[in-house]
Amino acid sequence: MRTRFLGAVVTLLACVPCVACQAATIQFLSPFGLGFGNAYGVDGLKVVGESNIGWLYDGTTYRVIQVPWGGVTVPHDVSGNNVVGGSGNSAFLFDGANYTKLTHPLGVNGTNAFGIDGNNIVGSYSDASKITHGFLYDGTSYTTLDFPGAKATWASGVSGTNVVGYYTDSKNRTHGFVYNGTAWTTLDDPQFMDTTSAYGIDGGKMVGTADNHSTAFGAFIYDGISYSHPFGVEALFFHQFFGISGNRIVGTYKDKPFVYIIPEPATLVLGMLGAACLLGLYRRQHHPSRSCRLRPGQSE
Protein backbone atom coordinates (compact mmCIF):
# COMPACT_ATOMS: atom_id res chain seq x y z
CA MET A 1 0.00 0.00 0.00
CA ARG A 2 2.79 2.35 0.96
CA THR A 3 4.59 1.63 -2.30
CA ARG A 4 1.47 2.24 -4.39
CA PHE A 5 0.72 5.49 -2.54
CA LEU A 6 4.24 6.77 -2.97
CA GLY A 7 4.11 5.77 -6.61
CA ALA A 8 0.99 7.85 -7.10
CA VAL A 9 2.67 10.87 -5.48
CA VAL A 10 5.76 10.50 -7.63
CA THR A 11 3.65 10.12 -10.77
CA LEU A 12 1.66 13.27 -10.04
CA LEU A 13 4.76 15.25 -9.15
CA ALA A 14 6.36 14.09 -12.37
CA CYS A 15 3.39 15.46 -14.29
CA VAL A 16 3.69 18.95 -12.80
CA PRO A 17 6.89 19.93 -14.65
CA CYS A 18 5.22 18.74 -17.87
CA VAL A 19 2.31 21.07 -17.28
CA ALA A 20 4.66 23.91 -16.39
CA CYS A 21 6.64 23.56 -19.58
CA GLN A 22 3.62 22.84 -21.76
CA ALA A 23 4.03 24.92 -24.90
CA ALA A 24 1.40 27.04 -26.53
CA THR A 25 -0.15 25.51 -29.62
CA ILE A 26 -1.00 26.91 -33.04
CA GLN A 27 -4.09 25.91 -34.97
CA PHE A 28 -3.96 26.93 -38.62
CA LEU A 29 -7.37 27.60 -40.15
CA SER A 30 -8.54 26.62 -43.63
CA PRO A 31 -11.77 28.50 -44.34
CA PHE A 32 -13.77 26.66 -47.00
CA GLY A 33 -10.69 24.56 -47.70
CA LEU A 34 -8.54 27.60 -48.45
CA GLY A 35 -5.14 27.64 -46.80
CA PHE A 36 -4.66 31.39 -46.89
CA GLY A 37 -6.15 34.54 -45.45
CA ASN A 38 -6.17 36.55 -42.22
CA ALA A 39 -7.76 35.88 -38.84
CA TYR A 40 -8.63 39.23 -37.29
CA GLY A 41 -11.00 38.80 -34.37
CA VAL A 42 -11.86 36.21 -31.74
CA ASP A 43 -14.43 35.69 -29.01
CA GLY A 44 -14.19 32.33 -27.29
CA LEU A 45 -14.20 29.69 -30.03
CA LYS A 46 -15.51 32.12 -32.65
CA VAL A 47 -13.02 33.58 -35.11
CA VAL A 48 -13.59 36.01 -37.99
CA GLY A 49 -11.36 36.87 -40.93
CA GLU A 50 -11.09 36.99 -44.68
CA SER A 51 -9.67 34.81 -47.44
CA ASN A 52 -10.82 36.85 -50.43
CA ILE A 53 -14.22 36.33 -48.81
CA GLY A 54 -15.34 37.16 -45.31
CA TRP A 55 -15.91 34.27 -42.91
CA LEU A 56 -16.97 33.35 -39.40
CA TYR A 57 -15.64 30.15 -37.80
CA ASP A 58 -17.47 28.76 -34.75
CA GLY A 59 -14.92 26.08 -33.90
CA THR A 60 -16.56 23.53 -36.20
CA THR A 61 -17.90 25.14 -39.38
CA TYR A 62 -17.32 28.22 -41.51
CA ARG A 63 -19.98 30.71 -42.51
CA VAL A 64 -19.72 33.31 -45.26
CA ILE A 65 -19.90 36.95 -44.14
CA GLN A 66 -20.95 39.13 -47.05
CA VAL A 67 -22.78 42.47 -46.91
CA PRO A 68 -25.81 42.68 -49.24
CA TRP A 69 -24.82 46.03 -50.75
CA GLY A 70 -21.78 44.55 -52.50
CA GLY A 71 -18.05 45.06 -52.25
CA VAL A 72 -15.30 43.04 -50.64
CA THR A 73 -16.39 42.25 -47.07
CA VAL A 74 -13.70 42.09 -44.37
CA PRO A 75 -14.90 41.03 -40.90
CA HIS A 76 -12.58 42.41 -38.21
CA ASP A 77 -14.02 41.34 -34.88
CA VAL A 78 -16.73 39.30 -33.18
CA SER A 79 -18.54 39.59 -29.85
CA GLY A 80 -21.25 37.05 -29.10
CA ASN A 81 -23.47 36.91 -32.19
CA ASN A 82 -22.28 40.26 -33.53
CA VAL A 83 -19.62 40.76 -36.19
CA VAL A 84 -18.17 44.10 -37.33
CA GLY A 85 -15.94 44.98 -40.23
CA GLY A 86 -15.73 47.00 -43.40
CA SER A 87 -16.85 46.86 -47.01
CA GLY A 88 -15.94 49.58 -49.45
CA ASN A 89 -16.27 52.95 -47.73
CA SER A 90 -18.70 51.70 -45.10
CA ALA A 91 -18.45 49.78 -41.88
CA PHE A 92 -20.99 47.12 -41.03
CA LEU A 93 -22.57 45.34 -38.09
CA PHE A 94 -23.93 41.81 -38.57
CA ASP A 95 -26.11 40.43 -35.75
CA GLY A 96 -26.30 36.90 -37.08
CA ALA A 97 -29.32 37.65 -39.27
CA ASN A 98 -29.18 41.22 -40.54
CA TYR A 99 -26.50 43.58 -41.80
CA THR A 100 -26.48 47.24 -40.76
CA LYS A 101 -24.36 49.85 -42.50
CA LEU A 102 -22.33 52.05 -40.15
CA THR A 103 -21.21 55.44 -41.46
CA HIS A 104 -19.69 58.09 -39.23
CA PRO A 105 -21.44 61.45 -39.82
CA LEU A 106 -18.08 63.06 -40.66
CA GLY A 107 -16.67 60.06 -42.52
CA VAL A 108 -17.24 61.38 -46.02
CA ASN A 109 -14.13 59.54 -47.20
CA GLY A 110 -14.91 56.24 -45.50
CA THR A 111 -15.70 54.47 -42.23
CA ASN A 112 -14.30 51.18 -40.99
CA ALA A 113 -15.06 49.15 -37.85
CA PHE A 114 -12.24 47.17 -36.25
CA GLY A 115 -13.37 46.08 -32.80
CA ILE A 116 -16.48 45.21 -30.81
CA ASP A 117 -17.24 44.35 -27.19
CA GLY A 118 -20.89 44.15 -26.24
CA ASN A 119 -22.58 47.31 -27.53
CA ASN A 120 -19.32 49.20 -28.04
CA ILE A 121 -17.77 49.39 -31.50
CA VAL A 122 -14.49 51.08 -32.39
CA GLY A 123 -12.97 51.97 -35.72
CA SER A 124 -11.82 54.87 -37.83
CA TYR A 125 -13.20 57.36 -40.32
CA SER A 126 -11.69 59.71 -42.87
CA ASP A 127 -13.03 63.26 -42.91
CA ALA A 128 -13.40 65.79 -45.74
CA SER A 129 -9.69 66.65 -45.44
CA LYS A 130 -8.82 62.93 -45.60
CA ILE A 131 -7.55 62.96 -42.03
CA THR A 132 -8.10 59.68 -40.18
CA HIS A 133 -9.74 59.72 -36.74
CA GLY A 134 -10.67 56.93 -34.37
CA PHE A 135 -14.19 56.55 -33.04
CA LEU A 136 -16.24 54.80 -30.39
CA TYR A 137 -19.86 53.96 -31.22
CA ASP A 138 -22.16 52.80 -28.43
CA GLY A 139 -25.12 51.90 -30.63
CA THR A 140 -26.56 55.40 -30.43
CA SER A 141 -23.86 58.02 -30.84
CA TYR A 142 -20.29 58.38 -32.11
CA THR A 143 -17.42 59.74 -30.06
CA THR A 144 -14.28 60.80 -31.91
CA LEU A 145 -11.03 59.41 -30.51
CA ASP A 146 -7.92 61.41 -31.42
CA PHE A 147 -4.66 60.77 -29.62
CA PRO A 148 -3.47 64.21 -28.41
CA GLY A 149 -1.20 65.83 -30.99
CA ALA A 150 -1.41 62.92 -33.45
CA LYS A 151 -1.61 63.34 -37.22
CA ALA A 152 -3.93 60.34 -37.52
CA THR A 153 -5.57 57.86 -35.12
CA TRP A 154 -7.00 54.36 -35.58
CA ALA A 155 -9.04 52.66 -32.82
CA SER A 156 -8.74 48.91 -33.35
CA GLY A 157 -9.84 47.06 -30.22
CA VAL A 158 -12.14 47.53 -27.22
CA SER A 159 -12.66 45.72 -23.92
CA GLY A 160 -14.97 47.28 -21.38
CA THR A 161 -13.99 50.95 -21.09
CA ASN A 162 -10.52 50.42 -22.58
CA VAL A 163 -9.70 51.09 -26.22
CA VAL A 164 -6.45 50.21 -28.01
CA GLY A 165 -5.16 51.31 -31.36
CA TYR A 166 -2.32 53.21 -32.95
CA TYR A 167 -1.47 56.71 -34.14
CA THR A 168 1.12 58.55 -36.21
CA ASP A 169 3.09 61.45 -34.77
CA SER A 170 4.49 64.57 -36.46
CA LYS A 171 7.47 62.53 -37.71
CA ASN A 172 5.19 59.86 -39.20
CA ARG A 173 6.27 57.32 -36.62
CA THR A 174 3.57 54.88 -35.51
CA HIS A 175 2.85 54.22 -31.83
CA GLY A 176 0.32 52.04 -30.12
CA PHE A 177 -1.99 53.41 -27.45
CA VAL A 178 -4.48 52.42 -24.80
CA TYR A 179 -7.26 54.81 -23.75
CA ASN A 180 -9.30 54.16 -20.60
CA GLY A 181 -11.96 56.78 -21.25
CA THR A 182 -9.96 59.47 -19.46
CA ALA A 183 -6.23 59.07 -20.01
CA TRP A 184 -4.17 58.18 -23.07
CA THR A 185 -1.08 55.99 -22.73
CA THR A 186 1.45 55.45 -25.52
CA LEU A 187 2.55 51.87 -26.17
CA ASP A 188 6.06 51.51 -27.59
CA ASP A 189 7.53 48.02 -27.68
CA PRO A 190 11.10 48.57 -26.38
CA GLN A 191 12.49 45.85 -28.62
CA PHE A 192 11.05 47.39 -31.80
CA MET A 193 11.44 51.15 -31.68
CA ASP A 194 10.25 52.06 -35.17
CA THR A 195 6.59 50.99 -35.24
CA THR A 196 4.22 49.64 -32.60
CA SER A 197 0.59 48.88 -33.46
CA ALA A 198 -1.85 47.59 -30.84
CA TYR A 199 -4.75 45.71 -32.45
CA GLY A 200 -6.59 43.71 -29.81
CA ILE A 201 -7.40 43.83 -26.11
CA ASP A 202 -9.12 41.56 -23.60
CA GLY A 203 -9.12 42.63 -19.97
CA GLY A 204 -5.59 43.77 -19.16
CA LYS A 205 -3.86 42.01 -22.07
CA MET A 206 -3.11 43.62 -25.42
CA VAL A 207 -1.70 42.19 -28.63
CA GLY A 208 -0.24 43.64 -31.78
CA THR A 209 2.83 43.80 -33.98
CA ALA A 210 5.97 45.93 -34.05
CA ASP A 211 8.98 46.38 -36.30
CA ASN A 212 12.35 48.06 -36.73
CA HIS A 213 12.35 49.93 -40.02
CA SER A 214 10.59 47.01 -41.72
CA THR A 215 13.61 44.75 -41.28
CA ALA A 216 12.83 43.01 -37.98
CA PHE A 217 9.33 42.17 -36.80
CA GLY A 218 7.68 40.83 -33.69
CA ALA A 219 4.20 39.85 -32.60
CA PHE A 220 3.74 40.98 -29.00
CA ILE A 221 1.61 40.37 -25.95
CA TYR A 222 1.51 43.24 -23.45
CA ASP A 223 0.09 42.69 -19.97
CA GLY A 224 0.25 46.30 -18.85
CA ILE A 225 3.75 45.84 -17.42
CA SER A 226 5.95 44.05 -19.92
CA TYR A 227 6.04 42.89 -23.53
CA SER A 228 6.56 39.27 -24.53
CA HIS A 229 7.36 37.96 -28.01
CA PRO A 230 6.36 34.29 -28.43
CA PHE A 231 8.04 34.07 -31.84
CA GLY A 232 11.05 36.24 -31.06
CA VAL A 233 12.48 38.56 -33.70
CA GLU A 234 11.61 37.64 -37.28
CA ALA A 235 12.84 38.89 -40.62
CA LEU A 236 11.07 38.02 -43.87
CA PHE A 237 7.96 36.06 -42.89
CA PHE A 238 6.59 37.10 -39.55
CA HIS A 239 3.68 36.37 -37.26
CA GLN A 240 1.10 39.04 -36.63
CA PHE A 241 -1.32 39.17 -33.70
CA PHE A 242 -4.67 40.88 -34.33
CA GLY A 243 -7.13 39.76 -31.67
CA ILE A 244 -7.30 38.18 -28.22
CA SER A 245 -9.97 36.45 -26.14
CA GLY A 246 -8.86 34.79 -22.92
CA ASN A 247 -5.99 32.46 -23.76
CA ARG A 248 -6.71 32.51 -27.50
CA ILE A 249 -4.95 34.92 -29.88
CA VAL A 250 -5.62 35.11 -33.61
CA GLY A 251 -3.37 36.34 -36.37
CA THR A 252 -1.59 35.57 -39.59
CA TYR A 253 1.66 33.90 -40.59
CA LYS A 254 2.81 33.58 -44.22
CA ASP A 255 -0.71 34.57 -45.29
CA LYS A 256 -2.19 31.75 -43.19
CA PRO A 257 -4.78 32.46 -40.50
CA PHE A 258 -4.10 30.86 -37.14
CA VAL A 259 -5.22 30.62 -33.53
CA TYR A 260 -2.45 30.75 -30.92
CA ILE A 261 -3.59 28.95 -27.75
CA ILE A 262 -1.80 29.58 -24.47
CA PRO A 263 -2.12 26.92 -21.72
CA GLU A 264 -4.42 28.06 -18.92
CA PRO A 265 -2.48 28.93 -15.72
CA ALA A 266 -5.18 27.13 -13.71
CA THR A 267 -4.01 23.79 -15.10
CA LEU A 268 -0.59 24.27 -13.58
CA VAL A 269 -1.96 25.53 -10.26
CA LEU A 270 -4.34 22.58 -9.85
CA GLY A 271 -1.60 20.12 -10.68
CA MET A 272 0.76 21.64 -8.13
CA LEU A 273 -1.91 21.78 -5.44
CA GLY A 274 -2.85 18.13 -6.01
CA ALA A 275 0.77 17.05 -5.79
CA ALA A 276 1.34 19.09 -2.63
CA CYS A 277 -1.73 17.61 -0.92
CA LEU A 278 -0.75 14.03 -1.72
CA LEU A 279 2.81 14.57 -0.61
CA GLY A 280 1.68 16.21 2.62
CA LEU A 281 -0.69 13.34 3.37
CA TYR A 282 2.02 10.79 2.71
CA ARG A 283 4.44 12.56 5.05
CA ARG A 284 1.84 12.80 7.80
CA GLN A 285 1.04 9.08 7.60
CA HIS A 286 4.57 7.78 7.34
CA HIS A 287 6.75 10.47 8.94
CA PRO A 288 4.85 11.83 11.97
CA SER A 289 7.90 13.64 13.28
CA ARG A 290 7.95 15.81 10.14
CA SER A 291 4.26 16.59 10.03
CA CYS A 292 2.13 18.98 12.05
CA ARG A 293 1.78 17.24 15.38
CA LEU A 294 -1.27 17.59 17.67
CA ARG A 295 -1.13 19.91 20.64
CA PRO A 296 -1.71 18.41 24.08
CA GLY A 297 -5.42 17.88 24.60
CA GLN A 298 -6.25 17.62 20.86
CA SER A 299 -7.58 14.45 19.33
CA GLU A 300 -7.71 13.10 15.78
Image: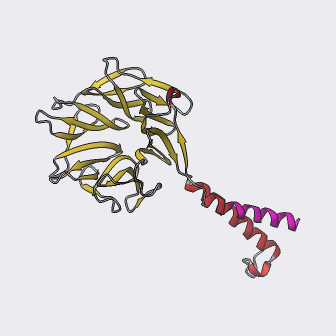
Q: In this view, does 101 lie above or below 1?
A: above
Q: Is residue 111 above or below residue 157?
A: above
Hey, which residue is sitting farthest right in the picture? 1
Point out the stretch of residues depicted in magenta. 1-15
* Image position, residue 290 (x, y; %): 75, 80
Q: Nearer the viewer, residue 246 or 60?
A: 60
On screen, residue 205 versus residue 181, left or right, reads right
Dominant secondary-structure state across the stretch colored magenta? helix
Residue at (31, 51) in percent of width and height? 214
On screen, residue 230 versus residue 135, left or right, reads right
Q: Nearer the viewer, residue 56 or 212?
A: 212
Q: Which colour scheme is used?
A: secondary structure
* Image position, residue 62 (x, y; %): 51, 27
Q: Is residue 271 above or below residue 144?
A: below
Residue at (52, 32) in percent of width and height? 30
Hey, which residue is sitting farthest left in the picture? 129
Quadrant of residue 266 in the image? bottom right
So how many labels did they put on this image?
Answer: 0
Quadrant for the C terminus, please. bottom right
Q: Does the magenta stretch include residue 12?
A: yes
* Image position, residue 58 (x, y; %): 52, 31
Quadrant for the N terminus, please. bottom right
On screen, residue 92 versus residue 268, left or right, reads left
Q: Is residue 235 magenta?
A: no
* Image position, residue 291 (x, y; %): 74, 77
Residue at (33, 49) in percent of width and height? 198
